[in-house]
């Protein structure tokens, strides 16, 4: 009766079986790592522009990014979700529960917060929508429904009415714009029915 290879050389068969099992284990680990990385990948920006394109595509859960801008200011961006499968003209990425913290070299700290934010990674533009707020370390708070921020030209414009509160003053207007946004030389303009309310601060 002819013996099988296993019966003729049991030691070699065991070695071969162990090698096969090791290869299967390595393949399984690689596949699992790919899916885990895909769901928990952090957001990264390049440093060649102010708020540049995300380096990975897809849907990212709880993205978090920090770094330096061209002018030396630091930034930190967080959100609950980042997606690039959106069908919105002129924008290629969407953030939910958006929060962008900006810290200039001269000490001005600005927080940009909104329910939704759309990003155009080609021209460093962000449109913040729904409960959109800008707060800074000068105790100024800008609140509007929509605001367009162009980081490459350092301009911000409201697309709806705005309410600004400071320590001594509240300003309401149909529109506002900021030149030299997020710098110590910001120039703010209000138009379309401007109302001023002075606070009695003791």
Image (spheres, grey):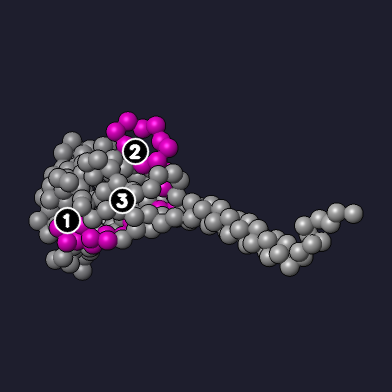
Q: Quadrant of residue 130?
A: top left
Q: Is residue 19 left or right of residue 39?
A: right
* Magenta region: 67-93
Q: Residue at x 40, y 41 (%)?
A: 84
Question: Which residue position holds label 3?
Answer: 133
User: Which numbered disc, 3 or 2, marks the residue that appears first in the sequence?
Assistant: 2
Q: Is residue 114 left or right of residue 17?
A: left
User: Which numbered disc, 2 or 1, marks the residue that appears first in the sequence?
Assistant: 1
Q: Helix or strand or loop: what does disc 1 sit on?
A: loop
Q: Is residue 100 visible?
A: yes
Dot in front, 3 or 2: 2
User: Which numbered disc, 3 or 1, marks the residue that appears first in the sequence?
Assistant: 1
Q: Quadrant of residue 160?
A: top left
Q: Which residue is outermost to the front?
A: 1
Q: Is residue 15 left or right of residue 181?
A: right
Residue nearest the observer in this picture, 192 or 155: 155
The local crowd at label 2, few if under 14, some if 14 to 19, many if 20 or more residues have their Cα within 10 Å, is some
Q: Residue at x 35, y 44 (%)?
A: 117
Q: Residue at x 12, y 50 (%)?
A: 180
In magenta stretch: residue 32: no
Quadrant including the C terminus: bottom left
Q: Please, is residue 140 above or below residue 55 in the view?
A: below
How far apart are the two marked residues, 2 and 1, measured between alpha carbons?
Answer: 22 Å
Question: Which residue position holds label 2?
Answer: 92
Rendering coords of residue 201 (x, y %): 21, 65
Q: Helix or strand or loop: what does disc 3 sit on?
A: strand
Question: Which residue position holds label 1?
Answer: 70
Q: Is residue 197 visible?
A: no
Rendering coords of residue 1 (x, y %): 90, 54
């Amino acid at each position: 009766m002819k013996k099988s290879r296993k019966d003729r050389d049991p030691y070699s068969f065991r070695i071969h079986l162990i090698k096969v099992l090791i290869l299967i284990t390595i393949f399984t680990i690689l596949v699992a790592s790919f899916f885990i990385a895909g769901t928990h990948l952090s957001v990264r920006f390049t440093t060649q522009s102010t708020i540049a394109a995300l380096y990975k595509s897809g849907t990212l859960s709880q993205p978090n990014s920090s770094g330096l801008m061209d002018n030396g200011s630091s930034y930190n961006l967080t959100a609950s979700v980042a997606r690039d499968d959106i069908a919105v003209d002129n924008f290629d990425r969407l953030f939910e529960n958006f929060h962008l913290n900006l810290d200039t070299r001269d000490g001005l700290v600005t927080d940009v917060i909104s329910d939704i934010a759309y990003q155009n990674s080609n021209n460093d533009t962000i449109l913040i929508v729904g409960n959109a707020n800008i707060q800074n370390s000068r105790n100024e708070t800008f609140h509007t429904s929509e605001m367009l921020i162009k980081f490459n030209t350092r301009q911000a414009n409201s697309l709806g009415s705005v309410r600004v509160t400071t320590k001594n003053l509240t300003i309401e207007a149909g529109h506002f714009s900021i030149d030299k946004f997020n710098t110590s030389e910001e120039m703010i303009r209000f138009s379309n029915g401007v109302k001023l309310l002075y606070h009695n601060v003791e």
